[in-house]
Image (cartoon, rainbow, N blue to C red):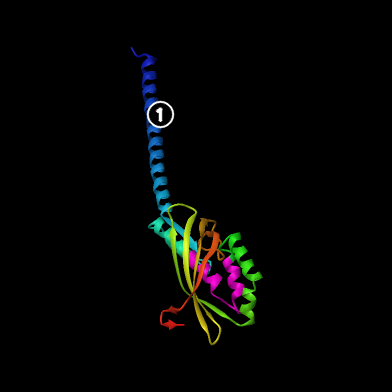
Amino acid sequence: MKTPYKNIYSLMKLNRFVVLTVVITAALTCIVSLILVIQLHKEMVHNAFVVNTDGHIIPLKLVSQQENLEVEIQAHLELFHTYFYNIDASNYDKNLDKALWLGDSTVDALYRQKKADGVYNRLLQYSLLQRVLKIESRIDIQQEPYHFETNTIFEINRGSIVDVYELITTGNLIHVDRNFPNNTHGFLITNFFENKLKKLETYGDRKE
C-alpha cells in the first residue's frame, strides 16, 4: 500500500539536493570572483599610467617601486635646479615661474629675497648668462619627507669673463598630486636652503 509520506520524503531529498547545489555553486562563484579581483589588483599595483606633454596616456611598468621613486626624485631635483639657476635675460621670468611650482614657500621666500637683493635686475642690466653645467643629488628615500643635498655647478658669463661656481643646496621632498605639465613628478620641495656657494678656480679644462 502506497502512502503520501514516501512522496514527501522524495521531495524533501530533492529540495535539499537543489539547495546544496545552489549553495556550492554560489560559494565557488564567490571564490573564483575573489581570485580574479586579487589578480586584477596585483596587475594594477604593478602598472601605472602617465600622460605625456601631448596629452597621450602611456602605460608605465613599475618593476621596482623603490628604484622608480629614486629616479623620479632625481628627475624632480634636476628639473627644479635647472629652472631656478639656468637663467638669462630672455628666460628668467618663465623659468622661475616653472621652478616655483616645484617647491613650497621656502623656495618662494628665496626667490623674493634674490629679487629684493637685485639679482635679477643685474641679470637684465648687464645681460648676464647663468648656465647650469652639472647637477648631482644625494637623497635619502628611507622615510618621507625625503632629505636631499644637491651640488649644482653653474657658470656666469659676463662677456669677456666667465666664472664657475659650485652651489650646495639642501631640503626635503614630499609627495603631492601630479600636476601636468607644472609638476609632472608629483613632489614638492620643502625647507629649501642654499648652504654654500664657492667660486671654482678650475673646472674641467678651464682655469681662472
Camera-side residue: 154 or 8? 154
- Residue 117 lies left or right of residue 27; in this view the side is right
Point out residue 89 in the picture as x, y percentages from the top left corner: 61, 79
On screen, 142 above or below 78? above
Point out residue 168 in the picture as x, y percentages from the top left corner: 49, 67
Outermost residue toward the left in this view: 1
Q: Is residue 80 magenta?
A: yes
Residue beneath label 1, please? 19
Camera-side residue: 61 or 115? 115
- Residue 47 lies left or right of residue 180; in this view the side is left
What's the magenta region? 75-99
Residue 58, visible in the rendered structure: no
Q: Dividing the image into 4 quarters, which one contains the N terminus?
A: top left
Outermost residue toward the right in this view: 116
Camera-side residue: 183 or 202? 202
Amino acid bearing label 1: Val
Point out residue 98 in the picture as x, y percentages from the top left corner: 58, 68
Point out residue 177 in the picture as x, y percentages from the top left corner: 54, 57
Outermost residue toward the bottom in this view: 160
How packed mark 1 is, by other alpha carbons closer than 10 Å (few <14, some 14-19, many 20 or more), is: few
Kindly report the secondary structure that dominates the magenta region of the rendered protein.
helix
Q: Is residue 208 magenta?
A: no
Camera-side residue: 3 or 31? 31
Residue located at (37% from left, 37% from top): 28
- Residue 28 lies left or right of residue 77; in this view the side is left
Residue located at (64% from left, 70% from top): 115
Residue 164, visible in the rendered structure: yes
* Total numbered badges shown on the rendered structure: 1
Secondary structure under the numbered disc 1 in the rendered image: helix
Outermost residue toward the top in this view: 1
